[in-house]
Image: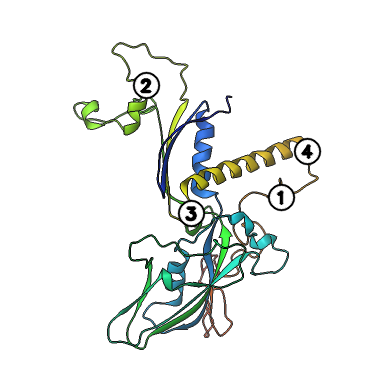
């Protein structure tokens, strides 16, 4: 395989990048696509300690909204996974970032609480991680909730490092476009149409980069796709080029682990000090499912209230 796989960068914006890969096979290109979607580590709010909440929204509802706010994940490698942290059992400055939220409505008008109201506490692993991503012209960010007069919320949010395979809040991308063979020369697609396929299935923009099939051209049964078009759209926590580079790095580490297992070399549990991307508490082992993402001043965790409960007729679940 030719390792010079990058054919060209078609377009690059703040939150989007179009590029083409060549000299690779379909399985490798699809592996990169899946890695970009689900296995690039980012920061997201994972725990919410509710101190005061007199709004009309439940604690769990606000905690869920907080978790979906994109947080800056630049140089996220400086942050340890919670399960690997040598300094704590739940969270600390080495494996998390603390954000404080306090808002109270004192006027007659309805007050909106925005992502900009999240205040990042020091210290933290570096100067970038944990900052809420705000891209609107007004500099407000996502709406968290609305408050009426005398309503108040005060919460302590703990952001941790994780991957989208565990929860979508850690997703670095909102979409990853992926296409090959835009003229369908390989006949991998069987178009359904009523009259004319050419009119009912217009070609994509990528068709301009390849030659159209000629009339009467003989079908090549041994042909394989070798040019792949990617369109990576970031949610803002990482720049699109950083998402691609991190995806390649993760894929290399996963392949290194496979080689290590096949060679029988078990001297080190991790490759390059990294055992592959995982959730803050890990899927296998650890305390996964023990903390449901928010706590109250009464010390109850895991979806419980001061009255107890928090379990279903089917028993406790990782989702509360």
Dot 4: element: loop
Q: Which residue is mark 2?
A: 185
Q: Tell me where residue 126 sits by quadrant.
A: bottom right
Cα separation between marks 2 and 3: 34 Å
Q: Residue 273 got which mark?
A: 1
Instruction: Give the mark nearest the N terminus, 3 or 4.
Output: 3
Front residue of this view, candidates 313 and 285? 285
Say which of marks 2 and 3 sits in front. 3
Say which of marks 2 and 1 sits in front. 1
Q: Which residue is mark 3?
A: 171
Dot 2: element: loop
Residue 176, visible in the rendered structure: no
Cα separation between marks 3 and 1: 23 Å
Instruction: Give the mark nearest the N terminus, 2 or 3.
Output: 3
Say which of marks 3 and 1 sits in front. 1
Q: Quadrant of the N terminus?
A: top right
Q: Which residue is mark 4?
A: 264
Name above or below for residue 107 compared with residue 174.
below
User: Would you say 102 lies left or right of 87 here?
Assistant: left
């Amino acid at each position: 395989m030719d390792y010079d796989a990058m054919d060209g960068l078609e377009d690059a914006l703040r939150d989007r990048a179009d590029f083409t890969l060549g000299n690779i096979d379909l399985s490798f290109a699809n592996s990169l696509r899946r890695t970009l979607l689900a296995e690039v580590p980012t920061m997201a709010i994972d725990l919410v300690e509710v101190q005061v909440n007199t709004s009309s929204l439940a604690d769990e509802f606000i905690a869920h909204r907080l978790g979906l706010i994109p947080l800056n994940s630049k140089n996220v490698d400086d942050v340890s996974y919670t399960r690997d942290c040598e300094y704590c059992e739940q969270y600390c400055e080495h494996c998390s970032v603390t954000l404080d939220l306090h808002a109270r409505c004192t006027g007659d008008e309805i007050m909106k609480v925005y992502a900009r109201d999240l205040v990042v506490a020091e210290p933290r692993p570096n100067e970038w991680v944990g900052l809420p991503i705000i891209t609107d012209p007004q500099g407000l960010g996502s709406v968290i909730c609305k408050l009426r007069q005398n309503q108040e919320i005060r919460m302590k949010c703990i952001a941790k490092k994780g991957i989208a395979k565990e929860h979508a809040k850690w997703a670095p991308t909102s979409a990853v476009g992926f296409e090959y063979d835009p003229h369908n020369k390989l006949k991998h697609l069987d178009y359904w149409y009523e009259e004319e396929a050419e009119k009912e299935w217009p070609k994509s923009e990528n068709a301009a980069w390849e030659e159209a099939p000629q009339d009467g051209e003989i079908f090549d049964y041994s042909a394989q796709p070798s040019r792949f078009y990617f369109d990576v759209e970031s949610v803002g926590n990482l720049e699109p080029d950083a998402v691609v580079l991190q995806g390649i790095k993760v894929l290399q580490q996963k392949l290194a682990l496979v080689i290590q297992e096949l060679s029988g070399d078990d001297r080190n549990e991790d490759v390059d000090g990294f055992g592959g991307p995982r959730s803050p508490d890990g899927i296998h082992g650890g305390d996964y499912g023990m903390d449901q993402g928010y706590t109250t001043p009464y010390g109850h965790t895991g979806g419980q209230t001061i009255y107890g409960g928090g379990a279903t007729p089917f028993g406790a679940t990782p989702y509360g």
